Image: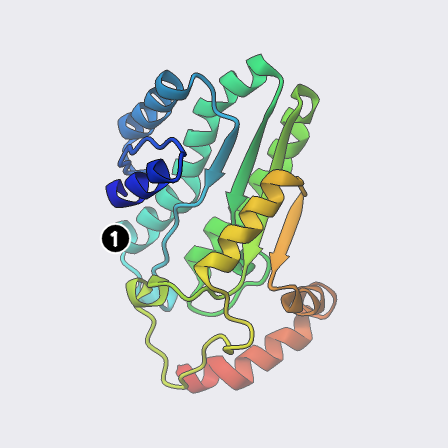
Amino acid sequence: MDALATEIRATGGEALVVPTDLTRLEQIEALVSQSLAHFGQIDVLLNNAGLGRLNWLEKLELEKDIDFQIQVNLTGLIQTTQMVLPNMIARKQGHIINMGSIAGLIGTPTYSVYAASKFGLRGFTEALRREVGIHGIRVSGIYPGGVATEFGQKAGIKRKTGISTPKSLKLSAEDVAQTVLRVVRKPRRAVIIPGLMRPTVWLNVLFPGLIDKIIESRYTRKER
């Protein structure tokens, strides 16, 4: 992060590095207080931190896999947002962007807890948007599909079938970053990327039984 901050400063930007563990409330408080002390205000809050622990539910460990995912992906995000809101409300402006996932729109096997955190994030984003809009605050949700990062390695994904996101649908970190910038410049309620995923999302809404059967036959039975 220090190297990135140096790069930002070299191009004329301003950067403040505050390493933060979202499972520690006092560190979230320090992040917000130091940011306000340094910049005087927070115009855009991008809640981007997240992780996955992917396995069959009965194989997940309560503290390491379940509690930790919910704390980082959802609870810590809510706490950070809550601490930033008073400054935005007082100024009658601001923009909160929550980084979700296609897993917050479509639940798939081994993603049970991760999906729970991302479905929760989506509900939080929608409800918050309707809470704070009268204060001039915008709230957006971004829902990307697979991204070429170290997420899969850290999540412990082990698949007998070798099924993964097709290369044609896999995003780069740059793709997601550019989407964030577009949403900052032109706020939207929700953005699904890549756009090719939208029909799948709608199929899951309109024909959940069909999607159940496809996933069960092509994935669950083979993996189990």
User: Is residue 138 shown above or below 178?
Assistant: above
Q: Position of residue 63 (x, y in %)?
A: 26, 49
What is the residue that sits farthest to the top in this orientation?
90
Q: Position of residue 220 (x, y in %)?
A: 47, 79
User: Which one is nearer the viewer's eye here, 175 or 60?
Assistant: 175
Give the position of the C terminus as an image quadrant: bottom left
**Residue 160 relative to residue 118: left or right:** left
Look at label 1 and name its amino acid. Lys
What is the residue that sits farthest to the front in this orientation?
11
**Residue 6 relative to residue 32: left or right:** left
> How many numbered marks appear?
1
Q: Position of residue 78 (x, y in %)?
A: 46, 34
**Residue 135 relative to residue 99: left or right:** right
Q: Secondary structure at mark 1?
A: helix
Give the position of the N terminus as an image quadrant: top left
Q: Residue placed at 35% from the left, 67% from the top? A: 152
User: Is residue 151 shown above or below 209?
Assistant: above
Q: Residue placed at 29% from the left, 34% from the top? A: 17
Residue where numbered disc 1 is placed = 64
Q: Residue placed at 47% from the left, 70% from the top? A: 109
User: Which one is nearer the viewer's eye here, 18 or 206?
Assistant: 18
Q: Residue placed at 43% from the left, 23% from the top? A: 83
